Image: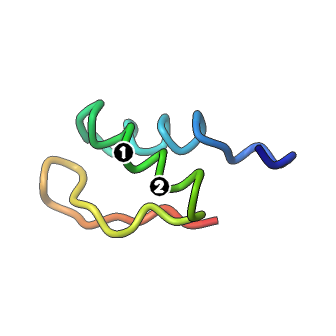
Amino acid sequence: MSSNSRGWIWAYNKARSYHVSRATAFFRATRFSIFGDTGSFTSHGGFRKSRIKR
């Protein structure tokens, strides 16, 4: 893992703060840790599209 503070746990917690399921947050955090980008996903109860990038 890189030395910066934005790792898997940070991405997981950030996705969970967007009101997505645990499974979605797990998948998106894994993508973030591998590729540096979660890709586009629905969040906030389906009312928004979000993306977390490095």
The front one of 35 and 42 is 35
Spatial separation of the CA atoms under disc 1 and disc 2: 6 Å
Secondary structure state at the residue bearing disc 1: helix
Give the image location of residue 44, x and y in percent: 23, 50
The front one of 10 and 31 is 31
At label 2, the amino acid type is Arg
At 58% from the left and 56% from the top, the residue drawn is 34
At 53% from the left and 45% from the top, the residue drawn is 11
Residue, disc 1? 27
Location of the N terminus (image quadrant): top right
At 34% from the left and 64% from the top, the residue drawn is 50
On the rendered structure, is 1 left or right of 40? right
On the rendered structure, is 34 left or right of 38? right
The front one of 27 and 48 is 27
User: Quick check: marks 1 and 2 in contact, CB under 8 Å?
Assistant: yes
- The figure's colour scheme reads rainbow
Residue 31: which disc?
2
At label 1, the amino acid type is Phe
On the rendered structure, is 14 left or right of 41? right
